[in-house]
Image: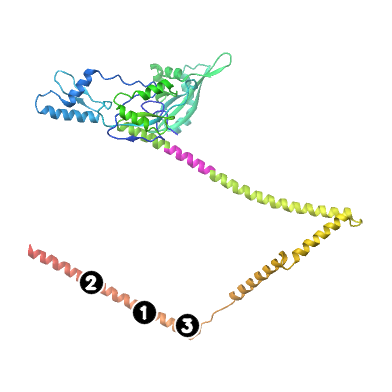
Amino acid sequence: MCAGAFGGFGTTTTSAGAGFTFSFTNPSSTGGLFGQQSQAPAQPNQLINTASALSAPTLLNDERDAILAKWNQLQAFWGTGKGYFNNSIPPVDFTQENPFCRFKAVGYSCIPRSKDEDGLVALALSKKEADVRNQQQQLVESLHKVLGSNATLTVNVEGVKALPDDQTEVIIYAVERSPSGMSKRVPASTLFNYMEQANVKVQLQQLAVVMAVPRTALSPAQLKQLLQNPAAGVDPIIWEQAKVDNPDPEKLIPVPMVGFKELLRRLKIQEQMTKQHQTRVDIISNDIRELQKNQGTTVAKIAQYKRKLMDLSHRVLQVLIRQEIQRKSGYAIQMDEEHLRVQLDTIQSELNAPTQFKGRLNELMSQIRMQNHYGTVRSEERYIVDTDLLREIKQHLKQQQEGLSHLITVIKDDMEDIKVIEQGLHDSVHVRSGKLS
């Protein structure tokens, strides 16, 4: 499961489940995932000026230009500052997007699957999730006013999810009803373009909306162009390696990361998703425990009902026996009844045989009675100690106790003597050291 919609440089996806590596050598750049356009390639003059600032500045025309070149290289690696190299040419601005910046990496974001006709637009609000949920109805009514208070238009909330830094993601869509009674969702691009208007943006900011992003999938052509053309400042070799290392090309797409701020943001999103997963796991665990408890109760009830069914079956059988006896009263024994009696006598004789079940049961019962008898006899046994012998034992234990007490006293005295000796040795060492000095 991937993180919320506000990740990947203002895109509709962020990476939470996919891992990424952050280093100081992988180049990267900015750019949105939706409608992402690579930054315009640097002009030849800009490239020449950058190369001059990093390798051969001619600002002072002495040995200090070499020091200035190293300083410009450091600024370029760090991604901030200005590179002075010539008195008649403006300095070069070093940003984190320049190809020499070292604080770059490539991560992975989920490819959105929603279609434009689904009409999903994600709003990032600078409010806590609990506050947004408590005021969800007021938010829907306010958004409806922002969209013109059209009676044929309704605003619906698809989902609410917490974001890092006490922000909340709210996914909405608008449904438009025609006079004929048919209804359809407003396309996400249309809804997003309306929200991007200057006057609408001001109204959304009053509702604590800090960003709006359409939840639309990339077309195959857009996805191909994004993969084939790395953004400005990204080393093509690193970009190709990132595509090769993609753990799931069907669901994930490489996304450049620039600077520690971007890394921190993605880590916060990762922690937020981990907390949400843990909360869901806790809920599932509670449900499992409740189901196990209900299962134990159900099993006990089933066993109880089985015993009750058996008792009822025995009672019904007894009723049938009595009814059959009354019905057959006065009649002679029939042939089938005689066969049953012979079979029952045979079974009874087999059970009563010495080597059959009844004989074995009698043998077990005899052994159980013998064990109970031996246990009773053993529990009644008592041991008696002679009085004189008991007195001698007490006297001996008393002497042993006195001897131990005397030994403890001797040890304590010896410990005190040892402390005195140690103190004397310590004082003598200090005296000798004072004389030597």
**Left or right: 351 as drawn, with respect to 143:** right
Instruction: From the top left corner, tell me how far across and down residue 428 is, in percent.
Output: 14, 68
Give the CA distance from mark 1 to mark 2: 25 Å
- Identify the magenta region: 274-287
Is 221 located above or below residue 286 in the figure?
above
Q: Nearer the viewer, residue 91 or 354?
A: 354
* Residue behind mark 1: 402
Q: Position of residue 108 (x, y in %)?
A: 38, 31
The span from disc 3 to disc 1 (Cα, nearest Å) is 19 Å
- What residue appears at the point 18 percent right and 19 percent down from the top-left corner? 90
- Percent across and percent down for residue 1 are 45, 34
Q: Rate crowding at label 3 as few (under 14), some (14 to 19) or many (20 or more) other CA atoms within 10 Å.
A: few
Q: Main secondary structure of the magenta part?
A: helix
Residue 78 rendering spot, x and y as whole percentages: 24, 31
Q: With 1 as the anchor, is 57 left or right in this view?
A: left
Name the residue type under label 3: Leu
Whichever of callouts 1 and 2 sits on the residue coming sooner in the sequence is: 1
Name which quarter of the figure residue 44 lies in: top left
